[in-house]
Image (cartoon, coloured by chain):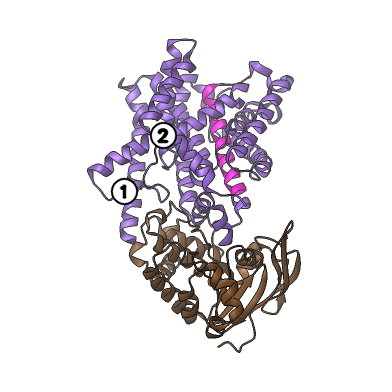
Amino acid sequence: MISQEPILYTVDLKKYFGEVRAVDGVSFRISPGEVVALIGPNGAGKTTFVNVITGYFNPDAGKIYYQGKDITKASRTKKIRMGIARSFQLVNLYAELTALDNVRIAVLSRLGKTGIFWKPVERFDDVRNEALEILAAFGLEEKAEVPAKALPQGERKLLDVAVAFALRPRVLLLDEPTSGVSSKEKHTIMERIVSTVRNEKIATMIIEHDMDIVFGYSDRVVVMYDGKILAEGKPEEIKQSREVQEKLLGVTAGAP
Amino acid sequence: MTSHASRQVRNKIIGYLIFLLVLALIPLFTRIGLVTEFVQNLLMYSIIFAIAGLAFNILLGYSGLLSFGHAAYFAVGAYTVALAPQFIGNTSFEVLILLALVASAIVSMAFGYIAVRLTRIFFAIMTLALTQLVWALILKLYWYTGGSDGVNVRAKPLLGIPFNEFMSRPEYLNTVFYYYLLGIFAISLFIIWLIVNSPFGRALLATRENETRAEFVGIRVRLYRWYAFIISGVFTGLAGALFAVLNGHVTPEQADWIFSGDIVFVAVLGGFRFFEGPILGSIIFTFVRQYAMGYAIFWRLILGSVLIVLILAFPSGIMGALNSIANRIRAGSRVLPAATTPTPTAITDIKHHQDGGREK
């Protein structure tokens, strides 16, 4: 599973904000079907790293390769079309729209149908059914007609991932998919996500603070510290690394 | 669930048809004396402002963009109808409408191209500024536009038939032109309804609700806003074209920012979160304004006061109030995909929208 060619990798990626070296020479790779946890204390540059990969920021140096091609300069929209999707640390949904519409808009966009203005959206049965299937995969089928803002936090987090998933990505970058959710619910959410992405062989990178989740659901753990990769390896290896223990687990002991 | 949705759509369509049917009967009511010609005349103004309000609401209601410059497209439509005959002679109204559509499309393409770079209050200010440009041009190019005196507009042949030559003006307006107007209103209603309920309409809602997310599902936010702007501008121009003939006279007032404000009011008063809101808003606005004008020279003051009271009483517009009453009577009905529960005031609603699309 992990031995395959990477679908996405970065070479010496850098992003500075003035004096702050948010991402400072990160070389990272991920293969299809792999679930990688990206951990590190607050301010380590994890979210910035995701923002650079998805084209939210342009890197100051370094390269991003996807399916063997250099996509460092590709636009956000282009990267999405190529199959790189993300979810957000803070839930980023269409609050007033139903769960169904949240997912449906993503499906329409992927199929290149958002330009159609001469036919009611309800007439696209295939799109509707696909959106409902995706909701079902995340256990949200009962909530299809509920506005996103009326969902409990846990379901909003799932919906956020479902929207990214609706783009049928090859690479999925999830920024703290379980933050702000009770620890009991965290496992439900992670099981849903991990089983869905494994079924579809999606390369998934998860930014996560909860070590139970990190060690329980990932194939590989990458530790970021001060914009650099401090360590990486199998969950057990990372768990036993003294450096990681000191710099990370010590630091984040009290953090959410 | 699909059957539920389609039943709702069917009910809605039946509602629209009844509404159009009632409007179609008005000239008969006028003839038998149930309705005065004056009221019918006001109704025609209402229908025209309803088209402008529906068009405006593609931006405010569906895209979360508050345009304070819709007078520009209205005036461009109206002045095209008023001025074109000097160059192309006395043609049928359809030709003039076509020209008005082209003219307002060109202007809204240009203005929209600039305005969609901004959101929230900055968008509103930019649209306002651009509109004042049109207003100033109309005023200053007086050898063409008649300056502040405006231009008279004669009745036009409709569908190539010169009704205007064998009918008196009131007769023309209250019969053939009325039905012509109603037909255009019905077509506009249908097209705008289709647009806002299409995948494109959903994409607009996405840009309204969350710009960042919309971009990260691959929607080209700015481009779609520009399209919405143009569609909105063109239908507003159409309303302007109809207005020119009904009013018989166009003046720079139609390009003034106060008139832009009137269009905003029509949508907010009726309920911009509801597709039908601007229609209702337009009817009430037109009649309230007319009666206020009859009372004093400070009619805007009276109008303003009445409208403030109405908006305080019905924060999500009159449609919002009607809807919550209907919901209380029979729970479980849904409105627009957009609208769920109305928020405290219409003003915070606007603000909420504008802030909703977080930038960057």
Q: Using the image as rendered, state which of residue A45 and residue A128 is in the foreground.
A: A45
Mark 1 vs mark 2, foreground winner is 2
User: Badge 2 local density, few (<14 within 10 Å), some, or many (20+)?
Assistant: many
Instruction: Report the residue at 56% width, 49% height from top.
Output: B358
Q: Colour of chain A?
A: brown
Residue A10 screen position, x and y as percent:
69, 75
Q: CA distance from mark 1 to mark 2?
A: 20 Å
Chain shown purple: that is B
Q: Residue furthest left?
A: B329
Which label is found at residue B270? 2
Circle 1: element type: helix
Report in which chain the residue with disc 1 lies.
B
Residue contact at pointers 1 and 2, CB within 8 angstroms: no
Instruction: Report the residue at 68% width, 60% height from top.
Output: A57
Is residue A5 positioned above or below B58 on the image? below
Question: For the residue marked with disc 2, what is the amino acid?
Answer: Gly
Q: Using the image as rendered, state which of residue A118 and residue A150 is in the foreground.
A: A150
Compared across the picture, whether B307 is left or right of B73 comes to left
Instruction: Report the residue at 28% width, 39% height from top.
Output: B325
Q: What's the magenta region?
A: B225-248
Residue B72 screen position, x and y as percent:
62, 32
Q: Is residue B182 magenta?
A: no
Compared across the picture, whether A133 is left or right of B159 comes to left
Q: Using the image as rendered, state which of residue A249 and residue B241 is in the foreground.
A: A249
Q: Residue furthest top?
A: B296
First in residue order: circle 1 vs circle 2? 1
Report in which chain the residue with disc 2 lies.
B
User: Badge 1 local density, few (<14 within 10 Å), some, or many (20+)?
Assistant: few
